[in-house]
């Protein structure tokens, strides 16, 4: 793999701020055949598309088989881990969002799990490590991410807290900020929160996910400063809508 290939793809290095789309796949909830279908569609996006693989809680543990299935039919498609725990790590992926849950006060998810994971990722070191500040925002209901992380999300009506948290993340050297309400959340990240984060992180990449159910939702996030929009549950529940998201970019 080209050094920093995924980092450069996720970053705003072209100066054009192209709208970019990530499909979040929970390998527990996709068959091998459905993986092949959605991944073929993602190829149409070229460098504006990426597949994230993982979740807050995986029970079947078929991450490796999912990556193998994707690479068998779409070897040029970049697959980046969205790991809920060190158990989800694998060297078959092209990259890994190396999360620190910067919105929490849970030391285990701020640095503990990362200490456990680092030796695995560095040996043999073929999976690109992407330092990411992960922020959970209140999405109107308890999500799996909230429950598993044992952390309180940032209140919806406190964009200043979200902005300060994001600023702390990039000041600590994190390359990417990921604002999320969690898979299946009834509400997405508020627009004033997106604006507040965008205002303080400069050219750092802003990734937004959770509660995005339509191309119109996606458009609003781009208009308010998101670089990447992540869609998971909407496509998981109805794979046919993926083509609508892609056509809207």
Image (spheres, grey):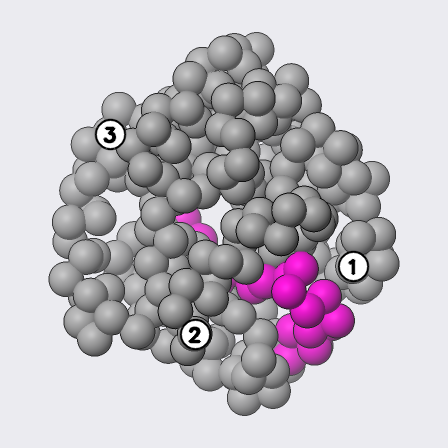
What secondary structure is marked by label 1? helix
Residue at the spot 59% in from the left edge and 62% down from the top edge: 50
Location of mark 3 (residue): 106
Please determine whether, in this image, residue 119 is positioned above or below residue 137. below
Res 144 visible: no
What secondary structure is marked by label 3? loop
Q: Say which of 56 and 98 sits in front.
A: 98
Where the N terminus falls, by quadrant? bottom left
Q: Are marks 3 and 2 in contact (CB under 8 Å)?
A: no
What segment is highlighted magenta in the picture? 36-60
Q: Earlier in the sequence, mark 1 or mark 3?
A: 3
* Residue 107 place in picture, x, y as percent: 19, 32
- Label 1 – label 3 distance at C-alpha: 36 Å
Please state which of the two labelled residues, at mark 1 or mark 2, is closer to the viewer.
2
Location of mark 2 (residue): 2
Location of mark 1 (residue): 246
Label 3 packing within 10 angstroms: few (<14), some (14-19), many (20+): some
Horizontally, residue 167 falls left or right of residue 230, namely left
- Label 3 – label 2 distance at C-alpha: 35 Å
Please state which of the two labelled residues, at mark 3 or mark 2, is closer to the viewer.
2
Q: Are marks 1 and 2 in contact (CB under 8 Å)?
A: no
Residue at the spot 26% in from the left edge and 38% down from the top edge: 109
Q: Say which of 11 and 233 sits in front.
A: 11
What secondary structure is marked by label 2? loop
Horizontally, residue 22 falls left or right of residue 221, namely left
* Residue 122 place in picture, x, y as percent: 20, 65
Give residue 100's mark.
none
* Residue 121 place in picture, x, y as percent: 23, 64
């Amino acid at each position: 793999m080209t050094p920093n290939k995924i980092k450069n793809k996720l970053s705003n290095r072209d100066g054009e701020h192209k709208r970019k789309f990530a499909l979040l796949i929970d390998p527990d909830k996709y068959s091998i055949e459905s993986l092949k279908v959605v991944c073929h569609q993602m190829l149409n996006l070229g460098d504006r598309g990426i597949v994230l693989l993982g979740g807050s809680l995986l029970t079947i543990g078929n991450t490796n088989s999912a990556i193998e299935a994707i690479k068998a039919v779409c070897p040029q498609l970049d697959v980046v881990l969205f790991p809920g725990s060190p158990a989800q790590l694998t060297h078959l992926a092209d990259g890994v969002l190396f999360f620190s849950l910067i919105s929490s006060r849970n030391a285990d998810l701020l640095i503990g799990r990362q200490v456990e994971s680092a030796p695995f990722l560095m040996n043999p070191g073929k999976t690109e490590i992407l330092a990411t500040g992960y922020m959970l925002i209140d999405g109107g209901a308890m999500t799996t991410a909230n429950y598993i992380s044992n952390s309180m999300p940032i209140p919806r009506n406190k964009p200043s807290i979200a902005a300060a948290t994001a600023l702390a993340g990039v000041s600590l050297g994190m390359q990417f900020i990921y604002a999320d309400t969690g898979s299946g959340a009834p509400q997405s990240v508020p627009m004033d929160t997106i604006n507040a984060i965008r205002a303080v992180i400069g050219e750092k990449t802003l990734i937004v996910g959770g509660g995005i159910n339509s191309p119109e939702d996606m458009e609003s996030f781009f208009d308010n400063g998101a670089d990447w929009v992540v869609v998971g549950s909407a496509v998981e529940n109805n794979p046919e809508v993926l083509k609508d998201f892609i056509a809207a970019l």
